[in-house]
Image (cartoon, rainbow, N blue to C red):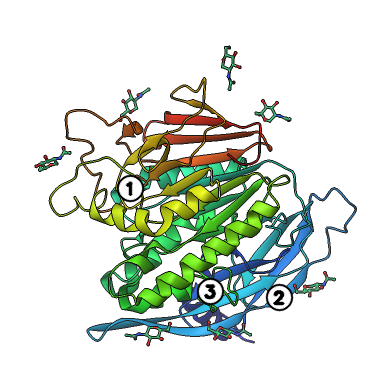
Amino acid sequence: MNISVTFLLAVFLTVNADFINPEEVHLSWTENPGEIRITWATKLPSKSYATFRPLLCDSVVNPSVWNQSRSNDTKFIYGSPEKYNHQFIHTATISNLNPNCFYEYYVGCNWVVSEKFVFSGRTPVLSSTANDAQAFKALIFGNWGYGISGQYTSYLMSRESQIRDFDAVFHLGNIAYSLDSHNGETGDDFFSMIQPIASSYPYMTIPGTQEDLANYTQYHMRFLMPKNNDNKGTGFFYSLNIGPVHFAMINSELYFNKTPASLALEQTNWLRSDLTSANQQRTARPWIVILMHRPLYCASNLSLTRHTICGSEATVLKESLEEIIYDNSVDLVISAHLNGYERSAAIYKGEVLKGANSTANYYTDPAAPVYIVSGAAGNSEGLDPLYQSVSVPETTEFVGSTYGYGRIYAYNTTHLYWEQYNAANLTQVDYLWISKSQARY
Ligand SMILES: *[C@@H]1O[C@H](CO)[C@@H](O)[C@H](O)[C@H]1NC(C)=O
Ligand SMILES: *[C@@H]1O[C@H](CO)[C@@H](O)[C@H](O)[C@H]1NC(C)=O
Ligand SMILES: *[C@@H]1O[C@H](CO)[C@@H](O)[C@H](O)[C@H]1NC(C)=O
Ligand SMILES: *[C@@H]1O[C@H](CO)[C@@H](O)[C@H](O)[C@H]1NC(C)=O
Ligand SMILES: *[C@@H]1O[C@H](CO)[C@@H](O)[C@H](O)[C@H]1NC(C)=O
Ligand SMILES: *[C@@H]1O[C@H](CO)[C@@H](O)[C@H](O)[C@H]1NC(C)=O
Ligand SMILES: *[C@@H]1O[C@H](CO)[C@@H](O)[C@H](O)[C@H]1NC(C)=O
C-alpha cells in the first residue's frame, strides 16, 4: 500500500469513526436474575458486541478470558417532520453473572470500541427462596434534566460513581427535560451526561409526566426495564428483590390524563398481588419500598399552574393506592414530580403513626408508611418555591429546596437509612433512620 492510500484510509477511518463511535452507554437489570443489559447508540449501523470478562471475583475465575455478546441493533428514527434524526440503538445482554464478581466491559464493533467500564455481577433475585442478605444501597431521585441546573448532580454523582459505594440508581421519571426536546437531541445530551454513572450501575427508571410524549417512543427505545407478562412487555411497572428490600416500581401516569382506566386497574391489581407475595417473604426481606413519579403526600403550596400536585393529583393517588400501601405495611414511598424535597412523617390517612419514642430523624417501629418527595435533581424548570403557607402541617417532617438527590441504605433486616444530599455544596439536607423489631406493622 503506498503512502497516500494509507493516508486516505486513515482519514476515512478517522472521519467515520465518529459515526460508529459507541455513545450513551447505559446499563439496566432485566427480567431475569443474573443478567444485565447494556444499551448504547451509534449514528451509523455497525455489527456490534459487548465484550466482557469477570474481574475481582471471590472465586477463582481466569480474568484473561474475554467473552462477547452480540448486540441487537435497531434503527431508531426520532424528531419531527421539521427535522428527523436517526441513530442505531444497540442492546446486548450478559447472562449467568456471578454475584461475587465485578465485570469489565467495552462495547463497539471491530473498528471502534468504547472505553472500558466496570459493573457488579450482583443482580436482583426473583425466586421466593433466594436470599441475598447483603446491605443494599442506591441513589434515588426524579426530575433530572440536561442543562445548567442538572450539572451539580451530574458532577457529584460521577464522583460518587468512582467510589462504588452504591449498587444502583433509580430515576423516578421526568428524564432529560425531555427526551423528545429539540428533535430528540436533548435526550442524546442527557445520555451523554449520565454515561459516567449509567455505564457502571444499573440505571432503573419509571415514567413521569414527560415520558409519554410521542407515545413513550423515546422512553421505550432507550430504557429497557424488566419486561414480563404482568406488564405485557412494556416494563412500565415491575418489582425487584435485592438485599433486604422489595422494590415495587409503578407508573403513576396511568392514573391520569388520556390513559384508559383499565390500564390503571391492571397496575393496581398487579401491585396488590405483588405486595401480597412480597409479604410472604417478609422475614427474609422485611423492607418494602414503592417508587413512583407523583406523590400521594406533599405539603408545598405551589404556583397556580402547579398547585394541583399536592392537591387534586395527590388525592387521586390516595384514593387508588393509599389503602393497598398501608394494608401491606409498605415502609417507604418515594416520588418526585415536585422540583424540591419533602419528607412526611409515617402517616395513614393524614394521621401520624411514627411509633413510640420516635424523633424527627429516627423512627422506631413506625406503624404507617413514610412518604418522601425527592425531585430536586435539577432541570430547566429550576426549583419550585416550596412551602409558602404559614406553617408546615404536623404530617410533614421536613421541607427543603436545594439541588440534590437521595440515597437509600438498607443495612439489614432491622435498620434502613435515607438521606437527601445537597449536590451543590456537598452537605446533607435531611436524613431518617427507620428501625424495626418486626417485619410488618
Ligand atoms: C431487538 O430489538 C427490537 C426493538 O426493540 C425488538 O423488537 C426485538 O425483539 C429485539 N430482538 C431481540 C432478539 O432481542
Ligand atoms: C459467554 O457469554 C454468553 C452470552 O452471555 C454466555 O451464554 C456464555 O455462557 C458465555 N461463555 C462463557 C465461557 O462464559
Ligand atoms: C401507542 O403505543 C401503543 C403500544 O405501545 C399502541 O397500542 C397505541 O396504538 C399507540 N397510540 C398511538 C396514539 O400511537
Ligand atoms: C420508649 O422509651 C421508654 C423509656 O425509655 C421505654 O420504657 C419503652 O419501652 C420505649 N417504648 C418502645 C416502644 O420502644
Ligand atoms: C396556597 O396559595 C394560594 C395562592 O397563593 C392561596 O390562596 C392559598 O390560601 C394557599 N394555601 C395554603 C394552604 O397555604
Ligand atoms: C443493622 O445495621 C445497623 C446500622 O448499620 C447496625 O447498627 C445494627 O447493629 C445492624 N444489626 C444487625 C443485626 O446486624
Ligand atoms: C449549603 O447550602 C444550603 C442551601 O443552599 C445552605 O443552607 C447551607 O448553609 C450550605 N452549607 C454549607 C456548608 O455551605
Residue 141 placement, left or right of 388: right
| Marked residue nearer the N-terminal end (3 or 2) | 2
Q: Which of pointers 1 and 2 lies earlier in the amino acid sequence?
A: 2
Q: Residue at x 33, y 70 (%)?
A: 185
Q: Position of residue 131 (x, y in %)?
A: 77, 51
Residue 276, located in which quarter of the rendered image?
A: bottom right
Residue hosting label 1? 378
Is 201 above or below relative to 258? Answer: above
Question: Measured from the top left, where is residue 9 in percent x and y?
Answer: 55, 83
**Left of 295 or right of it: where is 206?**
right
Horizontally, is 369 left or right of 386 in the view? right
| Residue at image location 53% in from the left, 59% down from the top | 204
| Separation of marks 3 and 2 at Cα, in angstroms | 26 Å
Indicate the amino acid at tag 2: Ser
Q: Quadrant of ligand 7?
A: top left
Q: Amino acid at mark 3?
A: Asn
Say if disc 1 is inside 8 Å of ligand 7. no
Q: Nearer the viewer, mark 3 or mark 1?
A: 3
Q: Quadrant of the C terminus?
A: top right
Q: Nearer the viewer, residue 306 or 369?
A: 369
Quadrant in which residue 411 is drawn? top right
Mark 3 and mark 2 in contact? Answer it, CB < 8 Å.
no
Task: Identify the secondary structure beneath mark 2.
Answer: strand
Horizontal arrangement in the rendering, residue 138 relative to residue 411 (left or right):
left
Residue that carries the numbered disc 2 in the rendered image = 69
Give residue 227's position: percent from left, percent from top: 58, 73
- The span from disc 1 to disc 2 (Cα, nearest Å) is 36 Å
* Type of the residue with mark 1: Gly
Residue under the point 48% across and 55% down: 324
Give the camera-side residue of 111 and 277. Answer: 277
Residue that label 3 marks: 231
